[in-house]
Every structure is written in C-alpha cells, then in structure tokens.
Image (cartoon, rainbow, N blue to C red):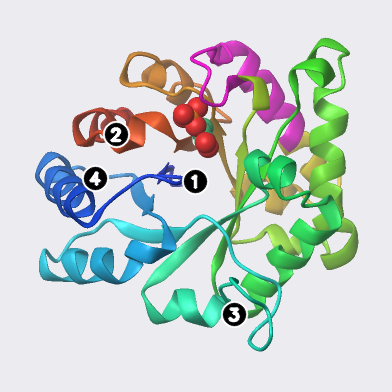
Amino acid sequence: MRRPLVMGNWKLNGSKAMVADLIKGLDAQLAGVEGVDVAIAPPVMYLDLAEQLLGKAESKILLGSQNVDVNASGAFTGDISPEMLKDFGATHIIIGHSERRDYHAESDEYVAKKFAFLKEHGLVPVLCIGESEAQNEAGETVAVCARQLDAVINTQGVEALNGAVIAYEPIWAIGTGKAATAEDAQRIHAEIRAHIAAKSEEVAKNVVIQYGGSVKPENAEAYFAQPDIDGALVGGAALNAESFAAIAKAA
Ligand code: PEP
C-alpha cells in the first residue's frame, strides 16, 4: 500500500513570524490525523527555525527543501548541499520544479544529477515533472513526462525510483487556479505509472505519485479518490494552515 504524501512548497515566501504561526496552526489542525505523511518545504533560510519548532512540538510534520545543489562543498556560491539539508532535519527535497527548470534553465540531465546526489545522501527526491500548456495542447503530455523520468531511469536504473516521490505538475495548472480535472490527472498518473511498469511492475506499484497544480481544500478529495494519485504537492494553499491541513485530511 502506498502512503500518500501531502507536501507544502512555500516557494519564496515567509518570515520568522510566519514560520512560527504556520507550524503552530498546522500542528493543532493535524493532531490525530493518520494515514498520510505531511511535509513542509520552507525557504532554506528558515529550516533551522522550522526544525527547532517542529522538534519542540514533537511534531510528525516532515521537513523538506525546495532545491539542492549537485556539489558537496567548495566554490559554489549560493548553493546548498544535501549534507547541509540533513544537518537541519530536511528529508524530502523538491527537484525539477518547473520554476527552476524555467527560471534557472535546469535541464532534465541536471535534475537527474540532483536526483542521484540526493539518493546517495539518503534523502528523498521529490521529482517534479509536467508539461507546458502548449505541450498539453499538442498532445505531448505523456511524452514530456516520460522524457523527464527517463533522464533518471536511463542513467540510474528504474530501481532508483524506489523510495523517491514523483510529483506530476502540469505547468499550466501551477499557481493559476486552473487545476487539471481529477479524471485527467488520473489518466496521466496511470500513464506515468505504466511507463515505469514497462521497466519494473514492482517499482511502479510502490512509487508515490503526487498531483500538483492549484490543489485546494475544495478539489483535494476528488484527486485523492483516484487510484493512482498519492497525495499532492501544494503551493499557494500551503501558506494557510487551515487550507493545507484540510488538504492533508482529505488524503
Ligand atoms: C507548486 O508550486 O508546486 C504548486 C503546485 O503550486 P500551486 O498549488 O499554487 O498551484
């Protein structure tokens, strides 16, 4: 049985006060909620504070990060290594988010390198894949997702996906309020799982595939009712404790 993961990507948002408020609110709202893993990815600047607050509250919320570098140390200005993230209790690391692919020109190969580096350091890659609006309209969704996945599978073997998380995020649905329908998302998730199953049915059966793109309390239940959707990667709605907790409860 796959355990759903609901993860909040805070992006470039936050302050010390907001971190404290959100963690307090989430812990209160999520008390007694079982059967789902919940993770938050604040900006790295706030990992220390978040780790301290989660520890003090004996929280079950997992800590994550929004990015990682492909180098362990040295002259790489502005970058963060897996061991640094581990030092602050982060376990789930988002890689390949479309905002990084677009704004920082991160290629499939570069993202796959990050994937391997995280695995090497015992961290969980949350690998974002997904198509643009133009690719969607051209009927290229599955091919794009397959290409992004194959950058990992063809270099590291399909077993590299064991213990990792895939987040299917259609780019046109991110932060737009224009979410994919639950049925369309399910269809793509099934295709992604089938693509992996062609290499290993066992890996395909066990790998967590989240949906991401304008998930809200109002539409979360419909996604989680689908057999191939295992939780969500949440942006905007993760900045509100009540909304994010409602999504986690729906999973
Ligand atoms: C995201 O950035 O990963 C995301 C899914 O954002 P939103 O939920 O705001 O669409």
Q: In this view, does 1 lie above or below 87?
A: above
Label 3 amino acid?
His
Dot 2 or dot 4, earlier in sequence: 4
Label 4 amino acid?
Glu
Q: In the visual, does 82 lie left or right of 129?
A: left
Q: Is residue 32 above or below residue 246?
A: below
Mark number, residue 34? 4
Determine the residue positioned at 31% across, 27% down.
250
Determine the residue positioned at 48% across, 80% down.
84
Residue 218 visible to the viewer: yes
Gap between marks 3 and 4, in whole Å?
28 Å
In the rendering, at what x and y percent does residue 42 appear? 38, 54
In the rendering, at what x and y percent does residue 176 appear? 53, 18
Dot 4 or dot 1, earlier in sequence: 1
Q: Residue 28: name its quadrant.
A: top left
Q: Is residue 116 above or below residue 201?
A: below
Mark number, residue 208? none
Report the residue marked by disc 1: 2
> Quick one: SS at disc 3?
loop
Q: Residue 171: name its quadrant.
A: top right
> Quick one: SS at disc 2?
helix
Residue 133 or residue 152, whichever sits in front: 133
Q: Give the range drawn in magenta.
A: 173-192
Report the residue marked by disc 2: 244
> Quick one: SS at disc 1?
loop
Q: Circles 2 and 1: CB distance less than 8 Å?
A: no
Q: In the visual, does 95 lie left or right of 251?
A: right
Determine the residue positioned at 35% across, 29% down.
237
Mark number, residue 121? 3
Marks 2, 1: nearer the viewer: 2
Q: In the visual, does 28 lie left or right of 94?
A: left
